């Protein structure tokens, strides 16, 4: 029998069970990994980790036989290390990320996914240089072992990191490259303009420019928009422009075998779609109109 796919979804972290609740939610979807935010994705208000039922969560991870090195934390969207226009926002982002690395380690985890940043109106070059500056400040006196996975972006607004070359630039210019990796996002890569319909070719291209050995996580999302749209609107598997078959070929690709795959697809009828989506990916078989039974 072949190894099960390392597959999960975004899960919540909320009262009353917090981290323990995140683990239970993941298991209820048939997942063997998951991704969480340490608080609301839109803000930087964070409860102390000591109040998050961390020991209970760690015990549940162990009992379920999940591999904590494959479980992911995502930094909030408001963080922007690319900002050269507003120094206070840049500094707040650096400070938040330093604390976030400590929170990730306190959860017993090792990977933090980060949107590299937006250049606002300063241009890609200035934005990339500022992201490098920020990442170096974050890592300078960091004592954790957490790696930052730079996410491939859709190129919405003034986002940097939408091309493989920009991701390469960041990895090449940080002071501690061993502390960094990449999170590939299928929706974003298509939105950025790449043709993802030939996984072998796309992964070979990524390998040449960035290196597949740097991939720490993959976000598996269908897209509401066609290639190159720069919109960043995720869609449920098989309901978007990418389609189930292509996404399944990434999820099951031998070159991504050890990479945790995380669904960030939207809720449907106010319900999480992850149990259904994970089941289809595990079976390797698409069920047409699967949302109708939700
Ligand atoms: Fe993201
Ligand atoms: Fe993503
Ligand atoms: Zn996205």
Image (cartoon, rainbow, N blue to C red):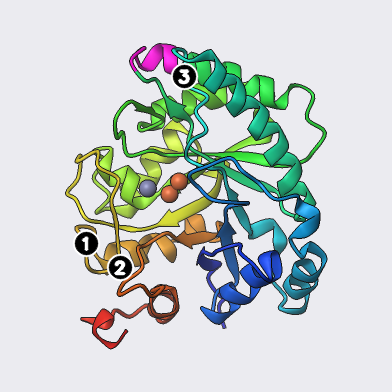
Name the residue carrying label 1: 240
Q: Label 1: state its secondary structure.
A: loop
Q: Classify residue 47 as left or right of residue 142.
A: left
**Separation of marks 3 and 1 at Cα, in angstroms:** 32 Å
Instruction: Look at 36% across and 17% down and name the residue there.
Output: 124
Residue 214 lies in quadrant: top right
Using the image, determine if residue 293 lies above or below residue 106.
Answer: below
Residue 94 lies in quadrant: top right
What is the residue that sits farthest to the bottom in this orientation? 293
Q: Position of residue 48 (x, y in %)?
A: 75, 49
Give the magenta-colored segment's residue range: 121-127
Q: Position of residue 56 (x, y in %)?
A: 79, 71
N-term-proximal mark, 2 vs 3: 3
The circle drawn on residue 200 is none
Residue 287 seen in the current view: no
The circle drawn on residue 83 is 3
Which quadrant: the C terminus? bottom left
Label 2 environment density (alpha carbons within 10 Å; few <14, some 14–19, many ≥20): many
**Separation of marks 2 and 3 at Cα, in angstroms:** 34 Å
The circle drawn on residue 237 is 2
95 or 33, nearer to the observer: 95
Label 1 environment density (alpha carbons within 10 Å; few <14, some 14–19, many ≥20): some
Using the image, determine if residue 169 lies above or below residue 241.
Answer: above
Looking at the image, do the residues carrying marks 1 and 2 touch, with CB atoms under 8 Å apart? Answer: yes
Q: Label 3: state its secondary structure.
A: loop
**Separation of marks 1 and 2 at Cα, in angstroms:** 7 Å
Instruction: Look at 50% across and 56% down and name the residue there.
Output: 256
- Could you tell me how many numbered marks the image carries? 3
Instruction: Look at 52% across and 67% down and name the residue there.
Output: 8
Foreground mark, 2 or 3, reads 3
């Amino acid at each position: 029998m072949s190894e099960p796919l390392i597959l999960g979804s975004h899960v919540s972290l909320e009262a009353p069970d917090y981290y323990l609740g995140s683990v239970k939610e993941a298991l209820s979807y048939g997942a063997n990994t998951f991704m969480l935010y340490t608080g609301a994705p839109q803000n930087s208000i964070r409860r102390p980790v000591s109040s998050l039922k961390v020991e209970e969560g760690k015990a549940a991870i162990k009992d379920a036989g999940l591999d904590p090195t494959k479980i992911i934390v995502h930094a909030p969207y408001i963080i922007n290390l690319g900002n050269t226009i507003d120094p206070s926002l840049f500094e707040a982002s650096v400070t938040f990320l330093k604390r976030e690395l400590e929170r990730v380690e306190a959860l017993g985890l090792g990977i933090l996914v980060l949107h590299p940043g937006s250049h606002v109106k300063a241009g890609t070059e200035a934005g990339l240089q500022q992201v490098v500056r920020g990442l170096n400040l974050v890592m300078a006196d960091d004592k954790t072992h957490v790696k930052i996975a730079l996410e491939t972006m859709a190129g919405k607004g003034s986002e940097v990191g939408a091309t493989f070359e920009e991701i390469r630039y960041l990895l090449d210019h940080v002071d501690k490259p061993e502390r960094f990796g990449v999170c590939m996002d299928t929706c974003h890569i298509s939105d950025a303009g790449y043709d993802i319909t030939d996984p072998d070719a796309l992964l070979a291209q990524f390998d040449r420019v960035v290196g597949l050995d740097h991939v720490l996580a993959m976000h598996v999302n269908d897209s509401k928009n066609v290639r190159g749209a720069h919109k960043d609107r995720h869609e449920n598997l098989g309901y978007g422009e990418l389609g189930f078959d292509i996404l399944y070929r990434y999820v099951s690709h031998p070159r991504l075998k050890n990479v945790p795959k995380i669904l960030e697809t939207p809720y449907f009828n106010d319900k999480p779609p992850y149990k259904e989506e994970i089941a289809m990916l595990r079976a390797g078989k698409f069920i047409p109109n699967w949302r109708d039974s939700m």
